[in-house]
Image (cartoon, rainbow, N blue to C red):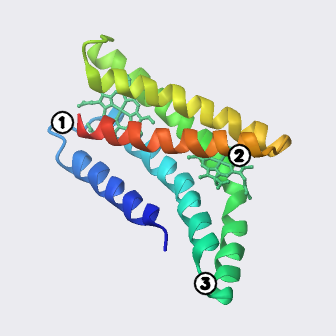
Amino acid sequence: MSKWFLLNFLLLGIIVWNVVHHPNIQIHVWIGLLGALLFLYNWMRNAVFETIRNVPNRRTKVRLARFSKKVVTIHRWTGNIAFLAIMLHGTLVIYRYGFTIYNVKMLVGVLALLALAFQVLTGWLRLYKPTIKLRYVHLYTGMTLFFLILIHMLL
Ligand code: HEM
Ligand code: HEM
């Protein structure tokens, strides 16, 4: 089992905790939650891949690989919808509070949005022209996003 399952469930817990304890839940919070959940769904692929690589039992390996193949077709759409949701989340937040770089939560949010745009771009490039380099860029941008979203939640 990959340590990423644990880390992902930890982030999921922090996200849900933040939303449940939000003093004034409005539409921008729900849409932020939707984007975060779609990101986590796509990022789980990393945990599944790591498990497939490390699991010693061949039958489990095959079962996980089959499951992974089934869910990959919607991966590109969940990734795109996550991007659209976060664009909307950011727009609604700026509409509500106004933009300022002195709000660090906002600043980290914008960095996460840029990383997400890059993640979607490398995803499509990878689909049409799979290279090792693109594979690693797609993977490490995903990891960067994980930590940016974690910081965005802790602020
Ligand atoms: C991948 C990117 C992003 C994700 C997953 C995300 C997710 C979330 C979630 C779930 C919340 C509600 C929980 C909480 O208040 O801690 C939230 C709040 C917030 N987000 Fe984001 N966000 C992202 C990008 C952005 C962007 C681009 C901005 C820029 C404007 C932004 C600004 C904010 C602000 C200011 C709040 C607090 C809102 C409030 O307390 O009413 N976020 N975000
Ligand atoms: C929230 C955005 C996204 C995240 C977090 C994400 C994450 C990931 C991860 C972790 C993997 C497995 C990495 C590996 O070990 O090789 C992967 C594979 C892949 N991603 Fe994404 N991705 C996102 C969006 C997209 C989009 C929009 C596309 C568009 C086509 C895409 C296309 C692909 C492809 C083609 C693969 C390889 C699939 C396979 O091996 O069967 N991704 N992605």
In screen coordinates, is 14 left or right of 47? left
Quarter of the image with the C terminus is: top left
* Quadrant position of ligand 1: top left
Single out the mark in the foreground, 3 or 2: 3
Q: Which residue is mark 2?
A: 135
Q: Residues within 10 Å of mark 2 (few under 14, many from 20)?
A: some
Give the camera-side residue of 120 and 51: 51
Single out the mark in the foreground, 1 or 3: 3
Q: Is mark 2 within 8 Å of ligand 2?
A: yes
In screen coordinates, is 144 left or right of 61? left
Q: CA distance from mark 1 to mark 3?
A: 48 Å
Residue at the image position 27 percent from the left and 51 percent from the top: 14
Asked if residue 32 can be seen in this view, the reply is no
Q: Quadrant of residue 27?
A: top left
Q: Are marks 1 and 3 in contact (CB under 8 Å)?
A: no
Q: Note whether 90 is above or below 48 in the view shown.
A: above
Residue at the image position 64 percent from the left and 76 percent from the top: 64
- Marking on residue 24: 1
Residue at the image position 17 percent from the left and 47 percent from the top: 21
